[in-house]
Image (cartoon, rainbow, N blue to C red):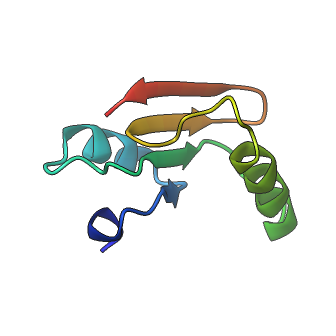
Amino acid sequence: MPFEEDRLIVTFDLDFGLLAATALPKPTAGVLLLRLAPQNPEEVATLLQALLARPDVVWRGHLSIVDRVHLRQRPL
């Protein structure tokens, strides 16, 4: 299970954000919710590479919601 393995969870499931915010135990490694309909898998890979390379973003302990333009975060 990702929670137990301390992995960042990446999902397109909009309901998963609510589940993550109310889950017990909290997913300490964080949740990355992609709010977009990608044209192809390469678009997703490029977006994820750019996001995960950002040194100014703390993924751990946050619900991060990303569309093509914005990144919003809230603590879990």
Quadrant where the N terminus sits is bottom left
Rendered location of residue 53, percent (x, y): 76, 47
Which residue is at 70% across, 25% downward? 70
View extreme (front): residue: 55
View extreme (bottom): residue: 1
Foreground of the two, 3 or 13: 3
Quadrant where the C terminus sits is top left
In the figure, 67 relative to 10: above or below?
A: above
Does residue 48 appear left or right of residue 11 in this picture?
right
Does residue 44 appear left or right of residue 46 in this picture?
left
Which residue is at 46% across, 53% downward? 13
Rendered location of residue 62, percent (x, y): 42, 36
In the figure, 10 relative to 53: above or below?
A: below
Rendered location of residue 11, percent (x, y): 51, 57
Which residue is at 79% across, 62% downward? 45
Rendered location of residue 64, percent (x, y): 52, 36
View extreme (left): residue: 24
Does residue 52 appear left or right of residue 63 in this picture?
right
Which residue is at 53% across, 45% downward? 33
